[in-house]
Image (tube, helix red, strand yellow):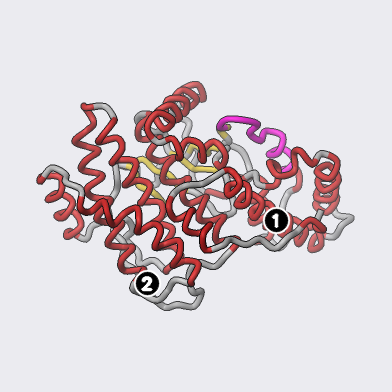
C-alpha cells in the first residue's frame, strides 16, 4: 500500500480556483488523494512503531491487503474521518491505540449521505460531550432540509459538501448560549455540531466547515504560510490572537459565510431578509479587514498569496454593494466594539 504514495502538487492556477470558492470534480479528487496519502503514511508509521506482529500491526496489515484487493473502496476508506482521527490519536499515544476501535469505526462508516457518529474514535478526538437532545430522525430531517436549501441557492457548496463531508458528530456546545460547529484537520470529512435550531442555521454551518476541510487538504499539499513567521492577528471571530495559518483558515471559511448570507438576503425567505443582510454586512467587512491584514503581513508564501488574492477577488468587490444603512451601521458598531463576533448565534471554532 505504501508503494502507492505520490508527491502531490497544486499549480498557481489551481490555488486561485480554490481561493475563488469553485471546486471542480478533479480538484476535489486531488484534495482527497492528498488526505489519503497522509493517512497511509500515518498508519504505516504506527504499524512499524507497534511492530508488524502486534495486534495493531496485524490490523493495519490486514487493512492494506483488503484495500489492495478492493481498490474501488480504497480512497473512501482512507479519507474517512475515523481513520484520520484514530491515526493521529494513536501517534500521540506513541502507538498505543486500540485497533478494535478503528475496526468498529470503519464498520459504521458512512456509505452515502451523512452519518451520525457518536462512537470512538471521533467522540474522544473532538473532546466534547455527545449531545443527546435531538433524535437521529430529527437530525436526518434537518440535514435533508439543509441540503435542499444549499442545492436551491448555493449550488457549488452543495456539490462540494456531498463529496467532502460524510460524518456528523453531535456535541453539546461549550458555550450553551450559542450553537457550535467545529472541525479537526485529522478527522477529514467530519463536523462536530451542536443541535441546530433549524435547517438554515445548519446550512450556514455546513458552508463554513466545508471550507476548513478544503483548506486543510490544500495545506497537506502546499505550504500557504511561512511556518516561522512571528505575526499574530486579532481577528473579529476569535478572542485569541491567531497565527497566519489559522487566520487564513478563518478568512477562507468566513468568506463562504459572507456569500451564504448574501444569497439568502437576496433570494431567500423574506422573513429572514433582515437577519441575513445584517450578517452579510458584518461578515463582508470583518473578512475584508482580516484579509487586508494578512495580505500586508508578509506571512503568506507565494502559494498562499495566490489563494488569498483569489479570496480577495470574491470579498473586496462586495464592500461596494449597497445594503440598508442600519445594517452597515450595525456592522461598523460591532466591529468597533472589539468583542468576539458570532453569526446567526453560531460560534464557529476556526
Q: Are marks 1 and 2 in contact (CB under 8 Å)?
A: no
| 207 lies left or right of 13 | left
Place of residue 322 in the rendered image (x, y in percent of width and height, measured from the top left):
16, 46
State how many labels appear.
2
239 is within the stretch colored magenta: no
Classify residue 177 by image quadrant.
Answer: top left
Give me the disc on residue 233: none
Q: Name the residue located 40 percent from the left edge and 41 percent from the top edge.
A: 205
Q: Which residue is mark 1?
A: 37
Q: Name the residue located 16 percent from the left edge and 55 percent from the top edge.
A: 332
Give me the disc on residue 232: 2
Place of residue 134 in the rendered image (x, y in percent of width and height, measured from the top left):
45, 27
Neighbour tally class for label 2: few under 14, some 14-19, many 20 plus, Cα within 10 Å: some
Sooner in the amino-acid sequence: mark 1 or mark 2:
1
106 is within the stretch colored magenta: yes
Compute the Cα span from label 1 to label 2: 31 Å
Q: Name the residue located 42 percent from the left edge and 38 percent from the top edge.
A: 194
Residue segment shown in magenta: 101-114
Place of residue 173 in the rendered image (x, y in percent of width and height, measured from the top left):
40, 42
Neighbour tally class for label 1: few under 14, some 14-19, many 20 plus, Cα within 10 Å: many
Mark 1 or mark 2, whichever is nearer to me:
1
| 11 lies left or right of 67 | left
Q: Name the residue located 48 percent from the left edge and 54 percent from the top edge.
A: 17
Place of residue 135 in the rendered image (x, y in percent of width and height, measured from the top left):
48, 24
Amino acid at each position: 500500500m505504501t508503494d502507492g504514495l505520490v508527491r502531490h502538487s497544486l499549480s498557481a492556477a489551481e490555488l486561485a480556483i480554490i481561493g475563488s470558492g469553485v471546486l471542480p470534480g478533479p480538484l476535489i479528487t486531488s484534495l482527497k488523494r492528498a488526505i489519503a496519502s497522509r493517512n497511509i503514511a500515518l498508519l504505516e508509521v504506527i504499524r512499524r512503531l507497534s511492530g508488524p506482529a502486534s495486534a495493531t500491526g496485524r490490523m493495519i496489515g490486514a487493512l492494506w491487503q483488503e484495500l489492495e484487493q478492493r481498490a474501488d473502496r480504497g480512497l473512501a476508506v482512507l479519507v474517512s474521518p475515523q481513520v484520520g482521527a484514530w491515526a493521529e490519536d494513536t501517534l500521540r499515544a506513541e502507538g498505543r491505540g486500540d485497533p478494535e476501535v478503528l475496526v468498529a469505526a470503519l464498520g459504521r462508516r458512512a456509505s452515502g449521505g451523512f452519518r451520525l457518529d457518536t462512537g470512538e474514535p471521533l467522540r474522544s478526538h473532538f473532546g466534547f460531550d455527545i449531545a443527546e437532545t435531538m433524535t437521529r430522525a430529527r437530525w436526518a430531517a434537518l440535514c435533508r432540509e439543509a441540503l435542499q436549501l444549499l442545492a436551491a441557492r448555493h449550488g457549488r457548496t452543495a456539490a462540494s459538501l456531498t463529496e467532502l463531508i460524510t460524518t456528523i458528530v453531535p456535541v453539546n456546545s461549550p458555550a450553551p448560549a450559542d450553537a457550535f460547529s467545529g472541525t479537526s484537520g485529522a478527522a477529514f470529512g467530519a463536523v462536530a455540531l451542536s443541535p441546530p435550531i433549524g435547517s438554515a442555521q445548519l446550512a450556514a454551518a455546513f458552508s463554513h466547515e466545508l471550507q476548513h476541510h478544503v483548506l486543510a487538504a490544500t495545506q497537506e499539499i502546499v505550504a500557504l504560510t511561512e511556518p516561522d513567521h512571528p505575526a499574530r492577528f486579532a481577528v473579529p471571530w476569535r478572542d485569541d490572537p491567531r497565527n497566519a495559518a489559522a487566520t487564513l483558515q478563518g478568512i477562507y471559511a468566513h468568506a463562504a459565510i459572507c456569500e451564504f448570507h448574501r444569497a439568502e438576503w437576496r433570494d431567500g425567505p423574506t422573513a429572514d431578509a433582515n437577519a441575513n443582510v445584517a450578517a452579510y454586512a458584518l461578515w463582508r467587512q470583518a473578512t475584508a479587514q482580516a484579509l487586508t491584514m494578512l495580505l500586508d503581513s508578509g506571512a503568506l508564501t507565494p502559494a498562499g498569496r495566490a489563494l488569498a488574492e483569489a479570496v480577495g477577488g470574491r470579498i473586496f468587490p462586495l464592500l461596494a454593494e449597497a445594503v440598508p444603512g442600519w445594517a452597515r451601521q450595525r456592522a461598523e458598531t460591532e466591529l468597533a466594539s472589539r468583542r468576539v463576533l458570532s453569526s446567526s448565534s453560531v460560534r464557529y471554532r476556526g
